[in-house]
Amino acid sequence: MTVPPYSDPPAVPAESSGRYSLWRLLREGLNGQRGWSRAWAKATPRPQYRVVIVGGGGHGLATAFYLASEHGINDVAVLEKGPLGLGNVGRNTTIIRSNYFHPDNIRFYDFSLKLWEGFERRLNFNAMVSQRGTLNLFHTEAQRDLFTRRANQMRLLGVDALPLSRAAVKHRVPLIDLDHGRYPVLGGFLQPRGGTVRHDAVAWAYARAASAAGVDVVEHCEVTAVRSAGGRVTGVDSSRGFIAADTVCLAVAGHSSLLAATAGVKLPIETHVLQAFVSEPIKPVLDVVLTYGAGHFYINQSDKGGLVFGGAIDGYNTYGQRGTLPMAEEVAAAGVTLLPGLARLRVLRQWGGVMDMSMDGSPIVSKTGVEGLSVNGGWCYGGFKAIPAGGVTTAHLIAHGEPHPLAAHLTLERFATGRIVDERGIGPYPYLH
Amino acid sequence: MLRIPCPWCGERDEIEFRYRGDASRERPAAHAGLAAFNALVYTRDNPCGWHAEWWLHVGGCRQLLKVVRHTLTHEIHWVGAPGEEPPSRPDGPPLPPQAGH
């Protein structure tokens, strides 16, 4: 693909975007909204950086922000092939939660959830963090045992999890058909601290904060290859020329295999597409993130009123950021089985995002065989909720050369040593669900 | 919707098939060592372009098929039996990384 010529508007110092506050909102409102300026500087890439982060999605921008704010490293560029927010950070269903089973996963994702809880204060940005709870339903006795075990595991590690009776589920979600002939709802398991975050605001918030800390956030700069010499990374080839770097971090989940291959690194990843759907907006009917247990289906209601829902990956290798109809039909069928009222709604939008599906269903935050090249990827379709923790742990890895204790189980070596993090217990398949 | 031309049943919808992954991997010799088997089980080429893959016609003849399909356009170049190889290469080289968006 040839990238059309793109000329930067004049750079605006990031600090001029100022601090956001209620007072500022009032003042600008009275001032005809003329006082707002660009939230992050439009940077032109310099020929050399200490750290180049490929991919201006949630993980790349968060890594840059924490490198600057926690480790004092701001000789950093984040290179994004298009405008910010159009990749997977803007293609997910915005859910945050830490209701995992594997202890290492619970610790990692709950650390992320805690960072979400302080996200808006820390970054001075309204990302509409809404801890409305995530509710997983069960439909068989065996599934109840499984969820009870998972909830107990969470509680042992100090993470919130509550069992809900049938009546409590019905009270919380009146739309549910509890008595479906084949898949009756026996109850649920709630994580009250789970919820949603406005996804594109996450990219904007990190970009603004990273830019203010001195990081170059470069849009319209597509990296085509990682360059190395003598087993050490030297920089990246991009649509705007070669950019030298001591350290390169790939944060391009969905396309990790392709860029890693240019450095001779082969990853335990397949790329698959996951679809998501939004209905026409309606009045408030659902105040929790709801997950069906007898099919793959999860749903929440956005603040605009649209019901946002999705299911499983389409199921075969693809880089096409679109879905095919059989999975759309399966998702719709599961949705209508659980919430019969959905049948009256029209789907307003549908889209697909491509995922790094790793071979054990867990992410990869790791060094590679090439000195100075690290990878943040393999997020399967759980990457959004992990953005703050992914950023902190990847920044730690870059700054110290050693994994952050919370992400020590996410290195590539685990596939060779057998210490895989098989959350679902399904073996070496990239299907996760 | 993929339409897969099964050599035994004719062209059928993808919902009749179950995907079984990359068909280009080859089992190493019995004593090839841990690294070779680790690579077989876990690592993948994962190309953006032409990809040889297994599809099981589970809702039809129940034969395992080898399919050469493009992972960006979803175009199917060839379908055959597991032991066969496509008689011709697909037109053009595999697409470069991140093409086509």
Image (cartoon, coloured by chain):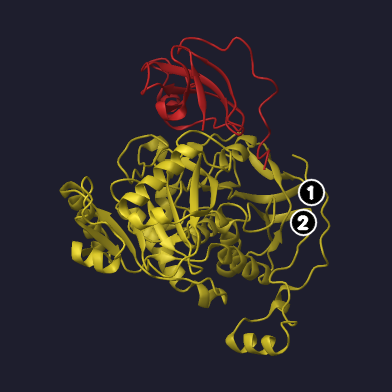
Chain colours: A yellow, B red
Coordinates of residue A415 in the picture (x, y in percent): 41, 37
Q: Is residue A406 found left or right of A200 in the rendered image? A: left
x 29%, y 65%: residue:
A174
Question: Residue at position x 56%, y 25% from top?
Answer: B69
Q: Is residue B45 above or below residue B64?
A: below
Q: Residues within 10 Å of mark 1 (few under 14, many from 20)?
A: some
Q: CA distance from mark 2 to mark 1?
A: 8 Å
* Disc 1: which residue: A240
Identity, as a three-letter code, of the amino acid under mark 1 = Arg
Locate residue A117: give its quadrant. bottom left
The lab-note entry on whether marks 2 and 1 share a chain reads yes
Left or right side of A361 for A170: left
Location of mark 2 (residue)? A45
Residue at x 74%, y 82% (from the top left corner) = A35
Q: Position of residue A62 (x, y in %)?
A: 56, 62
Q: Amino acid at mark 2?
A: Pro
Residue A92 seen in the figure: no
Does A148 appear above or below A233? below
